[in-house]
Structures are given as structure tokens and as C-alpha cells.
Image (spheres, helix red, strand yellow):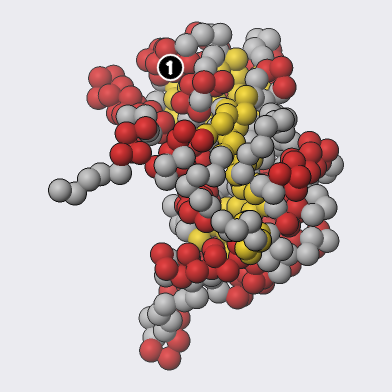
């Protein structure tokens, strides 16, 4: 008989955001009204005009025989990878080259799939609270018993320090989802040093890099010396360019980055990831990659900055309201998320805010045990909705 993957039984019954969606659907049915959603981190502003024009032009190209394109390169088109290498890295004096960049359909996909490069026996360290995908995909792969949680608490400002124990694979996310905090250069250097000393690999999720406002903070882990030997970086166009539905992201796997085989010999990760992509991925669509490339034009950069500024102004409104009520909170400065102290069962507070304020938040317990007692509030909504939702929240707090 066919047997199922027994590791799936180690997952929670519902994915966090699926459970939130189910509760919101029940609310809509019962109360016949639509709540304001400050929960899921979906964007509300439209695609930048530069990206839309590029989509139209690319669609017109593939509508004609002479300019039609079929399968593209699994790693992504060179025109986009070259722009990423130049603007996101080389202009910051980071020696990342276009052939070290892999275009994908989303940071979530890459964060989920990257663990396939590593042995099922690898020990894994992930922050707690944490974006659920890091945990769940490693559980599915059979690493549930080797998962170690790095406690993020109010005492360390939700920025875990490198442990004394040795772990093989470490997930870091900065600016952080869900807490909205940002790791400074010194702390990031400690993690790189840890990985070098322990022959470990860091998966660095920098999907919210565009929201960093402090010029002293690193935009890439590769700003730290020797990080290209031990780190894989993931970025996305979803939140800064409204590509949540269009889908485009990229992962950097430096050629210096390596793991080890059973004989403890170094093995480069770059060709392994390329081989994995060639096996399981036929490449992102040509029009979407053209749209992403347009974001690197002067107009596209301005449009991204306008969107980032809009959401960060929303975050500032929420933070000011929390300060006025002396509600303890983190984030919202270099990230579009605010993490606030709930003072009790986070799911109960979620339900209370939904039922009595018609506002959707995200319960911290859904991000791990260290998230209990906290809520995540997203700045991804229209200004008028943020202002109205903030007023409602404070009325019943």
C-alpha cells in the first residue's frame, strides 16, 4: 500500500494565515460586514506604472511569431539578473555577480525549497517567533526532531544571539517578520562568525530590505566580510513593488558558499541549487521578468520608494497611537510590521478585536511559543483604513 509522508503529521492542523482566513470568513458570514485587515502582509497599492508598461510590451512580444519566447532559462533571464547584481549589490560595493542570482516565483518558495540542498539529518536553528515556512518545510523534510528554536523575547528585543551549541543550518530574517525589528551590523557579523566557526550555512531572508530607513543598518548580509562563504540571501519584489500577486523574487547563492559531503569534503552549493532549479522549475514567465527589470529604471525606483514611504507612514501612525496609550511595541521603523504586547492569550485578543472592532490582526502565538502574548499589526493597507482601524483598536483596548 502507498504510505503518506508521516512527517506531515508533525505540522499544526492549519497554516497560520489559513486559520485567520477561516475565522474572518465566519465573521463576515455572521456579522455581514467586511473587517479592516491589518493582519496578512498583502499590498494594496497597484503595480508601478513602469512595471505595467513592461508587462504590456512583453505580452505584445510573445503575441507574434518573430518575437515569441517559450521556455526561458531556469535561473532567470540575464537582463534581470544583471540589473539585480548591479543595483542591489555592486553599487553597494558587494561582489555579487549575475550568475550567482536565481530568479523565482517568490521568497516563500525559495525559503521553503532551499532546505532541499541539505541532509535530512542537519540540525536547524530558527528564531522564535518565526515566519512559519522555515519551521514547517523542515518538519516536512523530516527534521522536526533536529529543530532548535532561538528565543526572541522582550529581554533581547526579539533579536536572538548566536547560541553556544553547534547547528548546521540557521534561518535569519531581517528586517524581521513578524516582529518588525532589524539586526545591526555588529550582531549580523556575530552570526557570520558563528557560521564560519561551525561550518554552518545561514539562510538570510531579506524580503523586507527595501523598508530599511536607518542608513547605518546593512541591506545585505554580504556587507559583512566573508558572508559569501556561509550565507544564502533571499529577496522579493512582492512588498516593495506590489508583486504579491504577480510573483517575482530572487535568491543569491555565491560560488564561494559550500557545504560538506559525507567524507567532510567541501561541496559548492551554487551548482547544486542550479541543478535543483533545472529539475523542478521551468523559469519565471518572460513578461513578469521584464516587469521586474523595469523597476530598476529611474522611474521604477521612484515608484518603489513612493510605495515604501506610504506603508512606513502607515506604520508611523500605528506606532504613534500605541505610544499615546503606552502600549509596549517593537518594529515599524525599518519594517512595515509592528509587534505589540497583548497582555494575554493572543488568539483570544485576535477574536476580540475582530468581533468588537472589526479589525484583523495576527496573533503572535501563530509564530511560535515566544510569540504568545503579542500581536502583529501590518501597515499594508490604505491610509484611511489604517487610521480608522487604529481608532477602533484603541477604543476597546
Instruction: Where is residue 171? Give x, y as percent.
Output: 60, 41
Residue 160 drawn at (x, y percent) = 69, 29
Q: Is residue 17 above or below residue 85?
A: above
| Residue sitting at x 47%, y 11% | 345
**Residue 14 appears in the figure:** no
| Picture quadrant where residue 250 is located | bottom right
Q: Is residue 163 left or right of residue 347?
A: right
Residue 232 in the image, given as x and y percentages of width and height: 64, 54
| Residue at 37% from the left image edge and 32% from the top image edge | 10
Q: Residue furthest front?
A: 263
Q: Residue shown at 66%/37% (left/top)?
A: 166
Q: Position of residue 59 (x, y in %)?
A: 43, 74
Which quarter of the figure has residue 172?
A: top right
In which quarter of the view is residue 155 placed?
A: top right
Front position in the image: 145 or 205: 145
**Residue linked to disc 1:** 347
Q: Residue at x 74, y 36 (%)?
A: 183
Q: Quick one: SS at disc 1? A: helix
Judge from the rendering whether residue 91 lies leftward or rightward of residue 305; answer left or right.
right
Amino acid at each position: 500500500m502507498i504510505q503518506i509522508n508521516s512527517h506531515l503529521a508533525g505540522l499544526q492542523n492549519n497554516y497560520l494565515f489559513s486559520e485567520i482566513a477561516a475565522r474572518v470568513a465566519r465573521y463576515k458570514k455572521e456579522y455581514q460586514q467586511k473587517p479592516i485587515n491589518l493582519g496578512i502582509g498583502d499590498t494594496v497599492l497597484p503595480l508601478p506604472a513602469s512595471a505595467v508598461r513592461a508587462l504590456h510590451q512583453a505580452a505584445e512580444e510573445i503575441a507574434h511569431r518573430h518575437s515569441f519566447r517559450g521556455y526561458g532559462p531556469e535561473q532567470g533571464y540575464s537582463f534581470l539578473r544583471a540589473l539585480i547584481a548591479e543595483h542591489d549589490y555592486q553599487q553597494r560595493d558587494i561582489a555579487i555577480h549575475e550568475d550567482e542570482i536565481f530568479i523565482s516565483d517568490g521568497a516563500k518558495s525559495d525559503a521553503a525549497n532551499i532546505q532541499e540542498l541539505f541532509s535530512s539529518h542537519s540540525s536547524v536553528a530558527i528564531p522564535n517567533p518565526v515566519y512559519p515556512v522555515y519551521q514547517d518545510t523542515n518538519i516536512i523534510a523530516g527534521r522536526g526532531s533536529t529543530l532548535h528554536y532561538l528565543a526572541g523575547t522582550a529581554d533581547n528585543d526579539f533579536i536572538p544571539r548566536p547560541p553556544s551549541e553547534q547547528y548546521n543550518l540557521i534561518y535569519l530574517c531581517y528586517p524581521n517578520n513578524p516582529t518588525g525589528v532589524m539586526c545591526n551590523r555588529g550582531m549580523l557579523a556575530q552570526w557570520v562568525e558563528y557560521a564560519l566557526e561551525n561550518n554552518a550555512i545561514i539562510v538570510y531572508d531579506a524580503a523586507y530590505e527595501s523598508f530599511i530607513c536607518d542608513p547605518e543598518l546593512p541591506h545585505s548580509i554580504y556587507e559583512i566580510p566573508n558572508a559569501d562563504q556561509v550565507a544564502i540571501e533571499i529577496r522579493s519584489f512582492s512588498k516593495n513593488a506590489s508583486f504579491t500577486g504577480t510573483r517575482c523574487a530572487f535568491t543569491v547563492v555565491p560560488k564561494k558558499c559550500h557545504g560538506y559531503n559525507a567524507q567532510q569534503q567541501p561541496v559548492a552549493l551554487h551548482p547544486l541549487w542550479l541543478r535543483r532549479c533545472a529539475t523542478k522549475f521551468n523559469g519565471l514567465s518572460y513578461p513578469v521578468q521584464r516587469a521586474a527589470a523595469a523597476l530598476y529604471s529611474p522611474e521604477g525606483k521612484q515608484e518603489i520608494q513612493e510605495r515604501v514611504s506610504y506603508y512606513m507612514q502607515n506604520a508611523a501612525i500605528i506606532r504613534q497611537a500605541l505610544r499615546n496609550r503606552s502600549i509596549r511595541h517593537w518594529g515599524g521603523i525599518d519594517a512595515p510590521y509592528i509587534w505589540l504586547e497583548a497582555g494575554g492569550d493572543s488568539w483570544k485578543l485576535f477574536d476580540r478585536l475582530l468581533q468588537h472592532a472589526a479589525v484583523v490582526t495576527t496573533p503572535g502565538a501563530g509564530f511560535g511559543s515566544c510569540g504568545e502574548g503579542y500581536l502583529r499589526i501590518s501597515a499594508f493597507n490604505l491610509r484611511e483604513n489604517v487610521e480608522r482601524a487604529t481608532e477602533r483598536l484603541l477604543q476597546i483596548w
